[in-house]
């Protein structure tokens, strides 16, 4: 009886000690876990408040976000987080059509993850925003299973870059292409094989207008002449200002008949639309040269068009002297 009582007391003591040890172990494990949570808490809060879109998305067996930062609501739309978590395929509905291929390649792991990825996404206002993404593929047992990435809004950066590129290729006064861009197209077509027309035009009265009415009116004359040349040019035509009063136009796949019709419309506009201005009508000397093939002959065509323009200008001067 005493032995049984002793064993029972010993069992209870061992059980108590075991439970106490288990509680101590659990306490310390909880304490360590709590410390870890406290350590990661600032990182989690920083991630939640960051302006960039951070995500972790599984790609197999289907798209599934394991994490998507709430900042998507600020950049794409108020309900974007909930919508994209429910249906990750929505990303293909808001991507710009020209960038959809890049997104598909990324989904299948075929994109170059060593380079930043630039894509445009449509926000809730219908505007496309440029994003730069740095993405890292996730592999499991050698199989591509997911992507971790961060999207950064670079819309302002792209807009500035496009503005600088535009200014580098366009004339500030007329908004036509500038001489450097025109020459680059001469070089380009010189390596192509397309029918092309090169047209050179020079204003006749710019010096007189500058002398009599000032450079402000002279600038207006240049701008209005530029508008006339742009008004009837096809979308792929290169209309450039290559000097103070000189313009040049490249028209690919344009026959002589089309060029004559184009010039007729331009000159009718110059005669018609400026009756209340001192430079009405706009007087311009023009020469053009057509080639069945642009390959290797662009400088020759340019020289011939320039010569014809000067011949036209000289003829006008002779006629003016004869009339006077």
Image: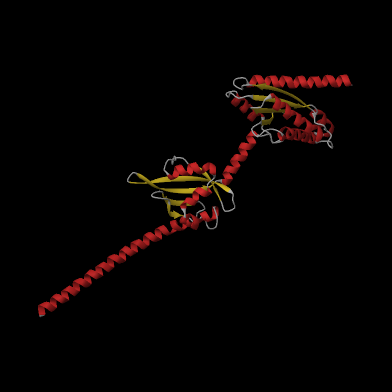
Left or right: 127 with respect to 149? right
Q: Is residue 232 above or below residue 69?
A: above
| Nearest the eye: 17 or 249 | 249
| Identity of the residue furthest to the bottom in this view | 1
Residue 272: x percent and y percent?
Answer: 81, 34
Examine the rendering and report whether any part of residue 57 can be seen.
yes
The residue at 49%/45% (across/down) is: 133
Residue 234: x percent and y percent?
Answer: 67, 33
| Nearest the eye: 85 or 169 | 85
The residue at 41%/57% (across/down) is: 40
- Scheme by which the image is coloured: secondary structure
Residue 202: x percent and y percent?
Answer: 75, 26
Q: Is residue 61 above or below residue 7?
A: above
| Identity of the residue furthest to the right in this view | 324
Left or right: 141 with respect to 83? left
| Nearest the eye: 232 or 255 | 255
Left or right: 323 with respect to 111? right
The residue at 63%/37% (across/down) is: 166
Examine the rendering and report whether any part of residue 245 can be seen.
no
Could you tell me which quadrant the N terminus lies in?
bottom left
User: Can you tell which quarter of the image residue 267 is in?
Assistant: top right
Could you tell me which quadrant the C terminus lies in?
top right
User: Can you tell which quarter of the image residue 255 is in?
Assistant: top right
User: Can you tell which quarter of the image residue 5 is in?
Assistant: bottom left
Residue 53: x percent and y percent?
Answer: 49, 51
């Amino acid at each position: 009886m005493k032995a049984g009582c002793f064993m029972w007391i010993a069992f209870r003591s061992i059980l108590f000690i075991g439970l106490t040890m288990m509680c101590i172990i659990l306490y310390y494990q909880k304490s360590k876990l709590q410390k870890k949570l406290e350590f990661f808490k600032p990182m989690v809060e920083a991630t939640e408040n960051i302006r960039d879109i951070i995500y972790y998305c599984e790609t197999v067996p289907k798209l599934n976000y394991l994490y998507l930062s709430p900042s998507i609501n600020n950049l794409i739309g108020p309900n974007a987080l909930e919508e994209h978590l429910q249906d990750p395929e929505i990303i293909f509905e808001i991507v710009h059509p020209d960038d959809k291929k890049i997104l598909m390649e990324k989904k299948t792991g075929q994109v170059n993850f060593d380079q930043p990825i630039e894509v445009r996404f449509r926000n809730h206002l219908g505007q496309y925003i440029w994003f730069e993404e740095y993405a890292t593929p996730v592999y499991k047992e050698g199989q591509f299973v997911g992507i971790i990435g961060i999207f950064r809004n670079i819309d302002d950066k792209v807009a500035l870059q496009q503005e600088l590129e535009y200014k580098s290729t366009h004339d500030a006064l007329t908004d036509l292409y500038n001489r450097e861009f025109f020459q680059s197209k001469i070089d380009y077509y010189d390596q192509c094989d397309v029918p092309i027309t090169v047209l050179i035009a020079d204003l006749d009265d710019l010096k007189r207008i500058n002398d009599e009415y000032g450079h402000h009116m002279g600038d207006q004359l240049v701008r209005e002449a530029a508008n006339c040349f742009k008004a009837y040019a096809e979308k792929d035509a290169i209309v450039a200002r290559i000097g103070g009063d000189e313009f040049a136009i490249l028209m690919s796949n344009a026959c002589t008949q089309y060029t004559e019709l184009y010039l007729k419309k331009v000159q009718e506009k110059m005669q018609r639309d400026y009756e209340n201005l001192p430079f009405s009508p706009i007087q311009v000397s023009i020469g053009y040269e057509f080639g069945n093939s642009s390959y290797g002959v662009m400088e020759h065509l340019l020289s011939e068009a320039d010569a014809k323009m000067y011949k036209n200008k000289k003829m006008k001067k002779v006629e003016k002297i004869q009339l006077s």
